[in-house]
Image (tube, rainbow, N blue to C red):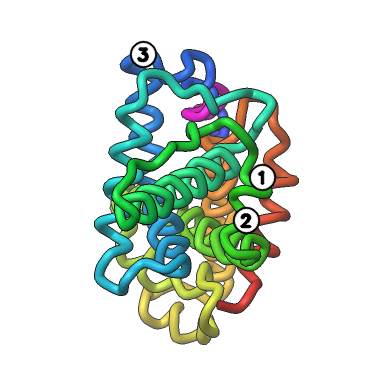
Amino acid sequence: MSSEPSQHFVTTRWTRVMAARGDSDSARTALAELCSAYYGPVVAFLTHTGCHPEEPREVAHEFFATLLARPGLSGADPDRGRFRSYLLGALKHFIVNRRLHASREKRGGMADHLPIGSSTDTSPELNLAGESPRLEAMFDHHWAMAVVERALALVESDTLAAGAAEQFHALKPWLSFESEPGSHAVAASRLGISEGAVRVAIHRLRCRFRERVRAEIAQTLPAGEEVDAELRHLIEALAAQW
């Protein structure tokens, strides 16, 4: 099995962002792509931090617009590592600033804003009513789900481009974390091939899926960061029940 997907991500999107601190078209495009990819975990986090049910998506758009409009990413520091950590820290700052603003408006004053990136995602002032560990675990769970969904979509795109749409849809259940895949015999009958050929095809599909998962994770890490450690963390996060 070719390792081609992994070879394309030596220079990751997050590395491009950090290298220019966001002050280039390439870096801003990379940041916009990452923000789009991980919109879901942000909405989930906002849903559990006091937003009204109809607000999280609107507030998420406001957050990303604020992040993308910044004249350089002062918080995008190589020492801070993963995009996941940076985005969570920035989101907490945004929520705190939003609450400060709402509180000051009620009192007739203006809010003092905490600069995004001025402290880490576990800073005391960003504890969010003592719920930070639970909320962080929930955020990571939804992040892991987003990684899986993106990797699955890329594998589907690969197989459709190769003219193997029917095979992908027949074997897709073997990539699922949520259901029993079913019978090799049924899949073999559907595809008109032997059960042995089905097993080989499933193995290849799973290899391709793993490559895509690793490549997607790599996009959120600085160059040289260990993908395996992040993968282990996300597998644990994915197993958590919410």
Q: Which mark is residue 37?
A: none
Q: Amino acid at mark 2?
A: Asn
Question: What is the distance, in whole Å, between disc 1 and disc 2 at their CAs?
Answer: 7 Å
Point 38% across, 64% down: residue:
168
* Numbered badge on residue 24: 3
Q: Which residue is mark 1?
A: 123
How packed mark 3 is, by other alpha carbons closer than 10 Å (few <14, some 14-19, many 20 or more), is some
Image quadrant occupied by the C terminus: bottom right
Foreground pick, 213 / 29: 29
For the residues labelled 1 and 3, the Cα–Cα distance comes to 29 Å
Of 81 and 112, the residue lying toward us: 112
Image x and y of residue 215, in percent? 54, 40
Where is residue 158 drawn, in percent x and y?
A: 37, 47
Crowding at label 2, few (<14), some or many (≥20) Cα neighbours within 10 Å? some
Question: Which of labels 1 and 3 is toward the front?
Answer: 1
Does residue 47 appear left or right of residue 215 in this picture? left
The magenta span reads 8-14
